[in-house]
Image: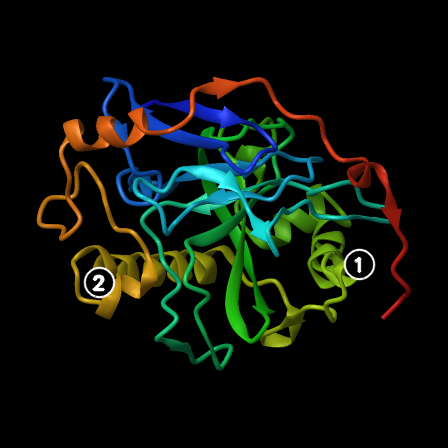
């Protein structure tokens, strides 16, 4: 099994913060394009890139429009984005991240949601007991999925579990989550429904009647978005969907670059520094009325 490390640039909680990825041999990677979706095929175990550790508020994400897709903090209206604490929740309920080598094509209307993709990798909620760190690459099994509609776009949320978790052997499908972790899926739905309300947005909408789908269903979504990514990385999408497809290992890709070019890009970033202070707003709690 390949292991991965990260190399920070800039200071956390600043506009300049970035985390780049390397493999065990020290080669620079694109987190979106070079890390394989599957860690093993039988049984299917997936690589998940952790963007936001559980209970934290900073909206970290793969920067898909930058070379090598490092993790950075999302920006809205020129300001760093932190999700609000909506009572009774604090930050994210799970280790939140993305599946590499997946892409929700904004030119494709998903027939199950009647909405186009959101132009991002597939989102993952990892529900194991360990609190991850930003940039950790976890090996997970898929348990199910939820069809969220985010501002008119399909934004699948895949439920998964770290294969090393104490409950992993007993968690194999979405019904197992309800049995072994009662209430978690209900609170997951509620969190996604309300988390943008304090910023002035309406409640989130959902496809498929807001019902969590099975592991088999979610694995098919992962495979579909992997095929969409293949079209993207192969240069078959006009303008690359506005994304940067630079990578250091995908043979035949239109975005393949050398390690020398990747090193030059990292050298142009600020050196790593201590984290900046968190804003006081991350300590506040917003009460959202029943919907």
Q: Which mark is residue 198?
A: 1
Quarter of the rendering containing residue 102: bottom left
Q: Residue at the location (36% across, 75% down)?
A: 108
The image shows residue 71 at horizontal and vertical percentages of 46, 38
Q: Nearer the viewer, residue 200 or 192?
A: 200
The image shows residue 183 at horizontal and vertical percentages of 77, 50
Colour basis: rainbow
Q: Nearer the viewer, residue 185 or 25?
A: 25
Q: Residue at the location (89% across, 66% down)?
A: 290
The image shows residue 287 at horizontal and vertical percentages of 90, 55
What residue does disc 2 label? 231
Quarter of the rendering containing residue 147: bottom right
Q: Is residue 39 above or below residue 201?
A: above
The residue most toward the left is: 252
Q: Residue at the location (46% across, 63% down)?
A: 217
Front label number (1 vs 2): 1
Under tag 2, what secondary structure? helix
Q: Nearer the viewer, residue 250 or 276?
A: 276
Q: Residue at the location (19% across, 36% down)?
A: 248
The image shows residue 78 at horizontal and vertical percentages of 59, 51
Q: Nearer the viewer, residue 110 or 172?
A: 110
Residue 1 visible here: no
* Callout 1 touching callout 2 (CB < 8 Å): no
């Amino acid at each position: 099994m390949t292991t991965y490390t990260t190399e920070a640039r800039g200071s956390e909680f600043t506009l300049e913060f970035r985390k780049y990825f390397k493999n065990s041999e020290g080669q620079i990677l694109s987190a979106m394009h070079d890390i394989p979706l599957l860690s093993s095929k039988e049984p299917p175990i997936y690589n998940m890139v952790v963007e936001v550790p559980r209970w934290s508020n900073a909206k970290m994400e793969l920067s898909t429009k930058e070379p090598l897709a490092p993790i950075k903090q999302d920006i809205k209206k020129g300001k760093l984005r932190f999700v609000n604490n909506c009572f009774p929740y604090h930050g994210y309920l799970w280790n939140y991240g993305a599946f590499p080598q997946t892409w929700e094509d904004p030119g494709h209307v998903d027939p199950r949601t009647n909405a186009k993709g959101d132009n991002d990798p597939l989102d993952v909620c990892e529900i194991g007991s360990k609190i991850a760190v930003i940039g950790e690459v976890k090996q997970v099994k898929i348990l199910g999925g939820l069809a969220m509609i985010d501002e008119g776009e399909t934004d699948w949320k895949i439920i998964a579990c770290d294969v090393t978790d104490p409950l992993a052997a007993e968690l194999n499908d979405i019904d197992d989550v309800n049995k072994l972790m009662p209430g978690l899926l209900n609170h997951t739905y509620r969190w996604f429904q309300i988390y943008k309300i304090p910023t002035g947005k309406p409640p989130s909408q959902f496809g498929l009647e807001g019902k969590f789908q099975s592991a088999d269903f979610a694995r098919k979504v992962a495979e579909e978005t992997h095929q969409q990514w293949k079209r993207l990385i192969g240069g078959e999408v006009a303008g690359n969907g506005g994304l940067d497809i630079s990578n250091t290992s995908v043979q035949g890709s239109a975005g393949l670059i050398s390690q020398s070019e990747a090193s030059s890009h990292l050298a142009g970033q600020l050196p790593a520094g201590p984290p900046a202070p968190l804003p006081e707003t991350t300590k506040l709690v917003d009460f959202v009325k029943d919907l």
